[in-house]
Image (tube, grey):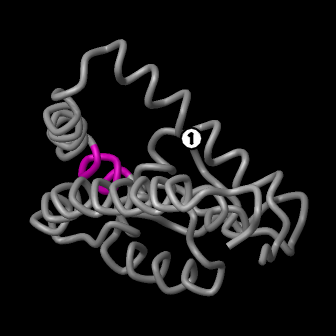
Amino acid sequence: MTNDVTREELDQSLKLFIVLSRANRSINDHVHKFIQQHGMNPTEFAVLELLYHKGQQPLQQIGGKILLASGSITYVVDKLEKKGFLERVACPNDRRVTYAAITPQGKEMIESMFPSHEKRIHDILSVLSSEEKEVAISMLKKLGHYADEFLPESTN
């Protein structure tokens, strides 16, 4: 233990980490179950939802936008293409770039699911008031940005 951090502070940080992890898992479990009832896995849904809301995307950039390893993108795109929910589109200006674009069938699938999906998320989070949600958003962004930008790769 370092000299400038008390045992109580370390315990409180560990408790917060555990509480955040459990809340995240519980919320995701409910959301993922709904998605799976519609014949997709959460990653397929995330890709389809991204294409629906943001338009066609370069395959190389999808992973970063939905927090998925780039090696998995090809597999997910292949599955969605086989289901008829997306298609690959060659970039007319750069042969090295291929886009994923949602198909009419994919758009129909998202439009049939998304209202229930967002309502489910709202229902889960409705235990918090609007003010509490704003505070949580602000605090979690602060925590995430600090973890991403300010912490060294390895701290001892």
Classify mark 1: helix, strand or loop.
Answer: helix
For residue 151, which quarter of the picture? Answer: bottom right
Our reading of the magenta stretch's main secondary structure is helix
For residue 61, which quarter of the picture? Answer: bottom right
Q: Residue furthest left?
A: 37
Q: Position of residue 72 (x, y in %)?
A: 55, 84
Q: Which residues are magenta?
A: 104-110
Q: Residue at x 30, y 74 (%)?
A: 83
Q: Position of residue 40 (x, y in %)?
A: 24, 70
Taking the magenta stretch, the answer to whether it contains residue 53 is no
**40 versus 50 height, above or below:** below
Q: Residue furthest top?
A: 131
Relative side of 68 to 93, left or right = left
Indicate the amino acid at tag 1.
Lys
Taking the magenta stretch, the answer to whether it contains residue 108 is yes
Q: Residue at x 9, y 65 (%)?
A: 37
Q: Residue at x 62, y 62 (%)?
A: 62
Q: Where the N terminus falls, by quadrant?
A: bottom right
**5 versus 75 height, above or below:** above
Q: Residue at x 79, y 73 (%)?
A: 155
Relative side of 38 to 153, left or right = left
Q: Position of residue 68 (x, y in %)?
A: 56, 71
Of residues 11 and 72, the one nearer the viewer is: 11
**30 versus 110 height, above or below:** below
Q: Residue furthest right?
A: 93
Relative side of 55 to 146, left or right = left
Q: Position of residue 105 (x, y in %)?
A: 30, 56
* Residue that badge 1 annotates: 54
Q: Where the C terminus falls, by quadrant?
A: bottom right
Relative side of 27 to 34, left or right = right
For residue 5, which quarter of the picture? Answer: bottom right
**27 versus 22 height, above or below:** above
